[in-house]
Amino acid sequence: MEGQARKVFRRLNKNFTNIRVPVRRLSGGQRQIVAISRALYFNARILIMDEPMAALGPEEARMVGDLIRQLKADGVGIFLITHDMPDVFNLSDRLAVMKNGKLVGTYRTADVTEDEVLGMIIAGKRPEGRVEVRRATSSKAPFSD
């Protein structure tokens, strides 16, 4: 088990050496590495990360951001849920904004400004002149044969 854990940790962060330290004694960033490693060990191809940098110091937040970029480069799909605009613009290719439980819009991150995203968040206003990313559609109903 330790050998498998070391293999996954090496993939995510070559500097992570606290393999025998109880998780409760790890820093927030190191705990994130453990959680992501667990998912990847079981061959997760998609990760849902809800505010992964909340309550982390600058160094740990940078470490988690670097990890997200690496996972993205490795082909792991990531749903990053965050209100932090620098994280949105530094880590995502596309963004979707919801307000009061309803989708306001989905756009390529490079195609919108921070002010436009804030307008979607605060006022539910879609940016004028911006092309929305098309959502995938299926002709088959879910769970049908």
Image: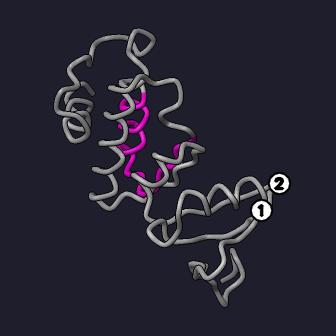
Image quadrant in which you'd find residue 45: bottom left
Question: Helix, strand, or loop for circle 1?
Answer: loop
Question: Helix, strand, or loop for circle 2?
Answer: loop
Q: Which residue is mark 1?
A: 124
Residue type at tag 1: Gly
Magenta residue check for 47:
yes
In this view, 10 is above or below 85: above
Pick the residue in front: 30 or 131: 131
In this view, 145 is above or below 118: below
* Of callouts 1 and 2, the N-terminal one: 2
Residues rendered magenta in the picture: 32-50
**Residue at image location 58% in from the left, 48% down from the top:** 81
Q: Image check: 89 left or right of 130?
A: left
**Residue 63 at x, y percent in the picture:** 31, 33
Q: Image check: 143 left or right of 123?
A: left
Q: Image check: 16 left or right of 120?
A: left
Which quadrant is home to the N terminus? Answer: top left
**Residue at image location 59% in from the left, 79% down from the top:** 130
In this view, 62 is above or below 17: below
Q: Nearer the viewer, mark 1 or mark 2?
A: 1
Magenta residue check for 120:
no
Q: Which residue is mark 2?
A: 100
Pick the residue in front: 142 or 80: 80
**Residue at image location 40% in from the left, 36% down from the top:** 38
**Residue at image location 49% in from the left, 36% down from the top:** 52
C-alpha gap between disc 1 and disc 2: 9 Å
